[in-house]
């Protein structure tokens, strides 16, 4: 399984916000520091804001900050927002391709459960 650059950039950007604490940070400064397109970050942060992972202050001195402490933001939750799904194969969510499952169904479920467990036990401050 391979995560997209959206996840890589999102985690790097959120890590930048974590470094500043509750202080609002402009996406322009994050984009410059992390060498990520500002437009790309803006689209990404719209999703993160909707998911209540970040909050935003408007205005000249505004910017984004984490909605809660980094130790309470699970990587699983962030990645689900950024990727949409982390299942290695469609049958990993319990659906089976045929009655009784196919020969590889169990391994996909096992891989997904292992990945989910790791990501739910890691938080932003573990980066």
Image (cartoon, helix red, strand yellow):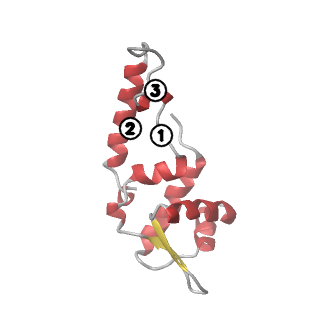
The kind of secondary structure element at disc 1 is: loop
Q: CA distance from mark 1 to mark 3?
A: 12 Å
Residue 89 visible from this viewpoint? no
The image shows residue 4 at horizontal and vertical percentages of: 58, 44
**Which badge, 1 or 3, is on the more N-terminal residue?**
1
Mark 3, Cα crowd under 10 Å, few <14 / some 14-19 / many 20+, is some
Between discs 2 and 3, the one toward the N terminus: 3
Q: Position of residue 67 (x, y in %)?
A: 41, 70
- Measured in 3D between alpha carbons, the distance from the residue under mark 1 to the one under mark 2, in whole angstroms, is 8 Å
The residue drawn where x is 47% and y is 73% is 65
Q: Earlier in the sequence, mark 1 or mark 2?
A: 1
**Which residue is found at the position 47% from the left and 40% from the top?**
86
**Tag 3 secondary structure:** helix
Mark number, residue 86? 1
Which numbered dot is residue 57?
none
Tell whether label 2 touches label 1 (CB within 8 Å). Answer: yes
Quadrant of res 117: top left
């Amino acid at each position: 399984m391979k995560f997209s650059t959206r996840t890589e950039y999102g985690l790097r950007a959120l890590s930048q916000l974590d470094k500043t604490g509750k202080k609002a940070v402009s996406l322009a400064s994050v984009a410059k520091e992390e060498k990520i397109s500002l437009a790309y970050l803006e689209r990404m942060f719209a999703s993160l804001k909707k998911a209540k992972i970040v909050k935003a202050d408007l205005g000249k001195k505004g910017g984004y900050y984490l909605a809660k402490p980094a130790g309470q933001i699970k990587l699983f939750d962030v990645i689900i927002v950024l990727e949409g799904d982390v299942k290695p194969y469609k049958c990993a969510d319990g659906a089976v391709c045929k009655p009784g499952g196919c020969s590889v169904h169990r391994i996909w479920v096992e891989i997904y459960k292992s990945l989910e467990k790791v990501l739910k036990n890691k938080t932003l401050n573990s980066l």
